[in-house]
Amino acid sequence: MKTCLIVDDSRVIRKVSRHILETLGFSVEEAENGQEGLDRCDESMPDVVLLDWNMPVMTGIEFIHQLRKREGGDKPKVVFCTTENDVAHIREAISAGADEYVMKPFDHETLQIKLQLVGMA
């Protein structure tokens, strides 16, 4: 079973994302900030990370920089899920190591398409 870590400070977004991912056959873990997400990755590296941009403690960009430096941190597919939709933010996310980008709010079909694009659905 593929694993996904949802890193988002919004409980509602985590709940909605979890529901979608579980219907797609993923085992899901959650973290409410980037540091908690890194701790979870240290315990067990997921196949996919759904990552929020704006969070307390550590931003999504800071998280991905730290993740990619870790042993095995190059493996997970990272999909940024955010309200930031300008080209500069998208470019920054991809440059930092993200594999894909999805706008909030998203639905089942949109997330499934993004996961297919990174080879995970």
Image: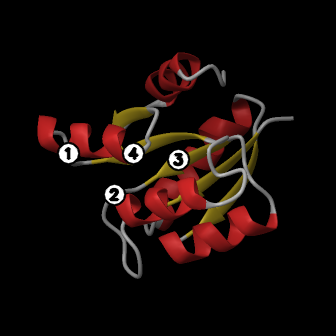
Label 2 and label 1: CA atoms lie apart by: 9 Å
Residue 65 figure quarter: bottom left
Q: Residue at x 52, y 42 (%)?
A: 78
Report x, y in % for residue 13: 46, 55
In this orientation, does residue 105 appear? no
Q: Which residue is mark 2?
A: 53
Q: Which residue is mark 4?
A: 81
Q: Nearer the viewer, residue 11 or 61?
A: 61
Q: Nearer the viewer, residue 90 or 54?
A: 90
Mark 2–mark 1 contact, CB under 8 Å?
A: yes
Label 4 and label 3: CA atoms lie apart by: 6 Å
Q: Which residue is mark 1?
A: 89
Label 1 and label 3: CA atoms lie apart by: 16 Å
Label 2 and label 3: CA atoms lie apart by: 10 Å
In this orientation, does residue 23 appear? yes
**In the image: residue 47, left or right of residue 44:** left
Q: Earlier in the sequence, mark 4 or mark 3?
A: 3
Nearer to us of marks 1 and 3 is: 1
What secondary structure is marked by label 3? Answer: strand
Q: Which residue is mark 3?
A: 50
Label 2 and label 4: CA atoms lie apart by: 7 Å
Instruction: Check the picture and name the quadrant holding the C terminus.
Output: top right
What secondary structure is marked by label 4? Answer: strand
